[in-house]
Image (tube, rainbow, N blue to C red):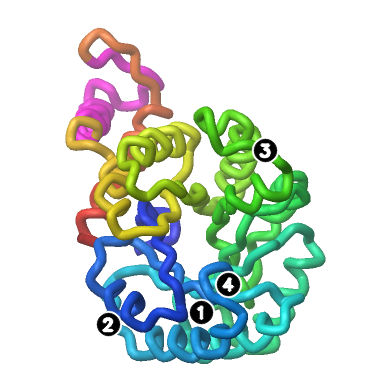
Amino acid sequence: MSENTRPRRSVLYMPGSKARALEKARMLASDALILDLEDAVAPSAKDEAREQVCAAVAQGGYGQRELAIRVNGLDTPWGRDDLAAAFKAKPDAILVPKVSTLEDMAAIRAAFAAAKVGGAIALWIMMETPLAMLNARELAGAAADSHAPLSCLVMGTNDLAKETGASLDHGRFAMIPWLATCVAAAKANGLSVIDGVYNDFRNIEGLAAECAQGRALGMDGKTLIHPDQLETTNRIFAPSEAEVERARAVIAAFALPENAGKGAIDIDGRMVELLHRDIARRTVAKAEAIAALE
């Protein structure tokens, strides 16, 4: 499965200090898991969490779920040890928090290069500071690297709210410019972009509204904090049966001999252009990738 079609509808944070949670994650219907050594782990439990997470990744048993380890920042007492242990465990990706500048990226990539992982582990970065919002274009534009290929931007909306004073209420209107900026930066460079968490995990109606908003903005999926959020998120970020049916009809219509070479055709009274065929192909590819994952 290519990076461009790999489903990342649901990306569930699992606290690395809780062995039972790491075990339970093997059975959850999440496209991807972030095994967390940072925010979800108290300072006194950092070393134990590191050992448990890396042992769980090395043991395997997570099926086709994409595994990312979120390390502590390189400027913390734990960050360098987290990275060294994660390199040995060999997850699919390493998620680094508080990445704000190209200098931050250079330091991270120097660590990847020194570990000689050869691009086998992808780099994900948290977009969670005001400076990261201002530098989103440059950060996403630094995607290509043989040692640490950047493949995903993960929104840290709680930290953004903390650092800026902006509100997460009222439909997140204060966040929309930053969310849209990161979507544009990601898509311009062939990256995935994952929306921030919805904190009121028992409010499924509110979650559904925020998922729909994120999808409308162009997000590929959403980070989650509770397994009860999985079904709603997976459903909303997947093409519906009706969407897939329409997409297949567009592809089939352009494939007809009488439409060969045409840039636009009439389908049931609606003018459809080649760009709609490209969107349709992407829709079908995503649906097929989700079916293969499930």
Write down the residue under mark 4. Answer: 38
Percent coordinates x, y for residue 242 in the rendering: 19, 31
Local crowd size for mark 1, using a 10 Å CA cut-off: few (<14), some (14–19), many (≥20): some
Q: Are marks 4 and 2 in contact (CB under 8 Å)?
A: no
**Residue 277, picture quadrant:** top left
Numbered label attached to residue 120: 1
- Residue shown at 51%/69% (left/top)? 40
Would you say residue 284 is visible in this rendering?
no
First in residue order: circle 4 vs circle 1: 4
Percent coordinates x, y for residue 135 in the rendering: 76, 49
Q: Is 174 in front, or is 66?
A: 174
What amino acid type is highlighted by mark number 1? Ala
**Residue 292, picture quadrant:** bottom left
Asked if residue 248 is among those painted magenta in the image, a careful observer would answer yes
Q: Which residues are magenta?
A: 244-267
Is residue 1 found left or right of 246 in the rendered image? right
Mark nearer the viewer, 3 or 1: 3
Mark nearer the viewer, 2 or 1: 2
Q: Main secondary structure of the magenta part?
A: helix
First in residue order: circle 3 vs circle 4: 4
Is residue 150 found left or right of 52 in the rendered image? right
Write down the residue under mark 2. Answer: 61
Cα–Cα gap, marks 4 and 2: 23 Å
